[in-house]
Image (spheres, rainbow, N blue to C red):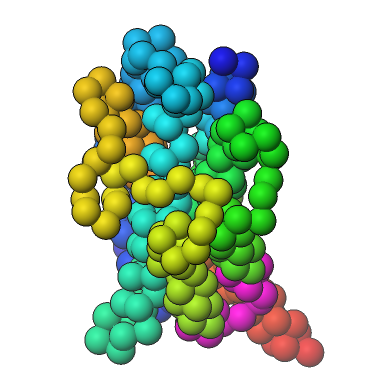
Amino acid sequence: MTTIAPPADPRLAEGAPATGPDGSARLRATLWTLGVLGAVSTGATVWLGIWVTPPDKVQGNLVRLVYLHPGVAWVALYLAFGLAALASLLYLWPRTRSLVWDRLAAAAVEVGVVFTACTLISGSIWGRPTWGVWWAWDARLTSTAVLLVLFLGYLALRRVPAEPHVRARRSAFAALFAAVDVPIVHFSVLWWRTLHQGATVLNPTLSPEIHGSMAWTLLLGIVALTVDFAWMLVVRYRIGLLEDRLGAEELDRAIDARRAEGGAA
Amino acid sequence: MNYVVAGYSITLGILFVYAVSLGFRRRRLARAVAAVEAARAPVTPPDPRSPQ
């Protein structure tokens, strides 16, 4: 008995695993473990941050937002956009050029945009009782808002129809251009006189200005949000892979339909 | 304390809603890909030794 399989699509050969659309059992187990770890550690951060740690001498209960806001900003700026810039570089480098890096960058940027929005919102909620305003055109806040707009532009650029490698190339340049703002956001509190306070942990002397249960809760918050980011990144990467598979299948069907039309005529 | 509760609720709420939407998007796409791939399943030609 002879079996005629559909032709292998070279567009899917790059980084497409030989698994079904739901992924392998190992991937599902990894996602489940990451999901449970992320939920438990985030829950523990909320419990410690709101009910266990003491209020601050200066900021009172508002200090409890410190267990969330820097963690969200850490994921957005350094993990998500750092990873997007690295993946874009690896795509542009001829020896490592693969659509895997393009998909990874796209996934990191989308998750990073959500975390950046959360950074701005949680910072604004902190700013209202501390500074008396929801928003100030301060260097740190403004550069972060610019970063959000730049990466929203990246996501819009990806929606412009193009051949996968053309889209990947222009997206990689856009990501590298947008990533230039990341060090500006980081050093803005040192370069300009800002309303926003200086770095608590990643300061120039690398001596954390937070101690005891507050320091541990802050660390746990950063770890929890990092695990949450990892889960979202893997799921978003899988979505990109499935979108590419679906796009290639639909293209093949359209080509088959045109051939059939040509044959009939 | 209201600002603290609002900060936690809104931030974690956004992340939760995004995570749930990711799960739904992945499931919907996986079903669509499975349906398309099933439609293009391997074609088995008739066996010449069969009585037909």
Residue at the location (40% across, 49% down)? A198
Q: In this view, does A259 lie to the left or right of A172?
A: right
Question: Does residue A183 show up magenta in the picture?
Answer: no
Image quadrant containing the C terminus of chain A: bottom right
Image quadrant containing the N terminus of chain A: bottom left
Residue at the location (21% across, 50% down)? A206
Relative depth, front residue between B12 and A203: A203
Write the start and end of the magenta stretch as one range.
Answer: A154-169
Most distant residue in the right direction:
A265
Q: Residue A76 at what x, y percent from top left?
A: 45, 51
Question: Does residue A158 show up magenta in the picture?
Answer: yes
Q: Residue A9 at what x, y percent from top left?
A: 43, 74
Q: Residue A251 at what x, y percent from top left?
A: 61, 73
Q: Is residue A239 left or right of residue A104?
A: right
Residue A152 appearing in the image: no
Most distant residue in the top direction:
A51
Q: Residue B24 at what x, y percent from top left?
A: 57, 38
Residue at the location (62% across, 37% down)? A131
Q: In this view, does A19 lie to the left or right of A113?
A: left
Tell me the quarter of the picture where residue A205 sits.
bottom left
Relative depth, front residue between B40 and A37: A37
Q: Is the magenta stretch mostly helix, strand or loop?
A: helix
Tell me the quarter of the picture where residue A17 sits.
bottom left
Residue A173 appearing in the image: yes
Relative depth, front residue between B47 and A160: A160
